[in-house]
Image (cartoon, rainbow, N blue to C red):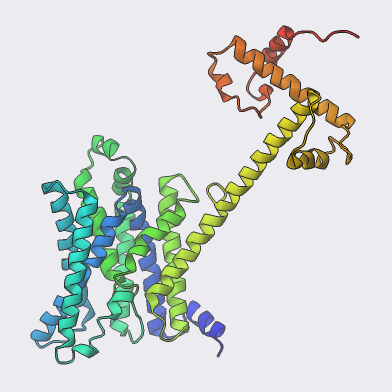
Amino acid sequence: MTALEHFLTALTLQAGYNSALVAVGAGLLGIAGGGAGAFVFLRKRALVSDAVTHATLPGVAIAFIVMVLLGGDGRWLPGLILGSAASAAIGLMAVEWITARTRLGEDAAIGAVLSVFFGLGIVLLTVIQTMEGGKQAGLDSFLLGSTAGMLIGEAVLIAAAGAVAVGLVVLLRRPMTMVAFDPDYAATLGIDVRRTDLAMMGLALIVTVIGLKVVGLILVVAMLIIPPVAARFWTDRVDRLILISAAIGGVSGYLGAALSAAAADMPTGPIIVLVAFALFAVSLAFSPRRGVLASALRHRRFQHRVHLRQGLLAMARGEAIYDRLTLAILRRRGLIRGDGVITQEGRGAAGRAQLDETRWSTARRLRADDPVLERYDGLTPIDEHLTSDQVAHLDSLLPKPEST
């Protein structure tokens, strides 16, 4: 079976029960991450989620040690998730406490919590390696994510938790949208901004602990940040941003998990993040309003309008044109011939451009306080801003051409 056939088999959920559950779970995780990340992104708290994800590592290690000391299996996923959730919650509260009770800013608090918790986690992982059976613990898979060898129960747990997270996003979307978009207005409506903020970060925490096994704690923050950033290229509306972000996250998780299932020994987390980045790159390049391509086309059209306008005015004034781009545009439009001689159509266009420029000059001199005339950009004809009667009035004030 070729790699493409392996991928298509995984994509259509026919690569085995475990792979299908992981793909569905990763898709649901992506939807939840994209939805929750939209609120975090709009609230400008993306770095807080980064601190939360790194704060999960000590919890994973401590949960493993405790379960081993109690005589259980230290790799029991629900126990590891509970430990990571507790550790992440402590990290989140530490950021909140440092920000509220000290003179340090949020960025300093995030840097301190992130580095201290992650350092503690690495130390504990080193300790675990010295324990009997510690080298086979496989806790390093929580760093970058891995679904290889995942048990059915673990896959079911991830899929179910992803579905719960999606449900919470749907349930809390209205107050979190209000707070993320305009917290002051939300407060006037009786919404508790602080509790909603905590719920928002709690949702990010849930996505983080769910995604530890699939994406890994180092990269799971990407599932909260990349989808809303990519979605921002497509819309200015909050509700659509949340939907698009959730869709991008869901597609990233599902496709990434399918690719990981098709490619043996490939870590799931980096693949999911790379798929999300690919969608971000597509948004960056091809978004109709904010994309790089659309921006380049708008710049090119504006540049051509400027050169055309200046070329027509130069023709009307009998001035020589030396700029190559201006000459090329005038030739392409049939306003001058190949030898530079002005055509009949070019004379008419030049006369209209000069008349429009004279109208603008007269209007701005006579009606300097008129806000409509502040829209003058040197390119737009004045009859697109004034009524025909106003333009006719301006024409009556223009000097009459001398009769020959």
Residue at 73%, 8% in the rendered image = 396
Asked whether, in this view, residue 234 is left or right of residue 269, the answer is right
Asked whether, in this view, residue 68 is left or right of residue 290, the answer is left
Quarter of the figure that contains the N terminus: bottom right
Q: Residue furthest left?
A: 70
Asked whether, in this view, residue 2 is left or right of residue 131, the answer is right
Quarter of the figure that contains the C terminus: top right
Where is residue 63 shown, x and y percent of the image? 15, 77
Residue at 42%, 65% in the rendered image = 250
For this rendering, which residue is in front, 108 or 34?
A: 108
Where is residue 399 shown, x and y percent of the image? 76, 8
Can residue 338 be seen in this snapshot?
Answer: yes
Picture layout, residue 52 above or below residue 354? below
Asked whether, in this view, residue 348 is left or right of residue 132, the answer is right
Residue at 24%, 67% in the rendered image = 54
Where is residue 350 shown, x and y percent of the image? 79, 26
Where is residue 296 shown, x and y percent of the image? 60, 48
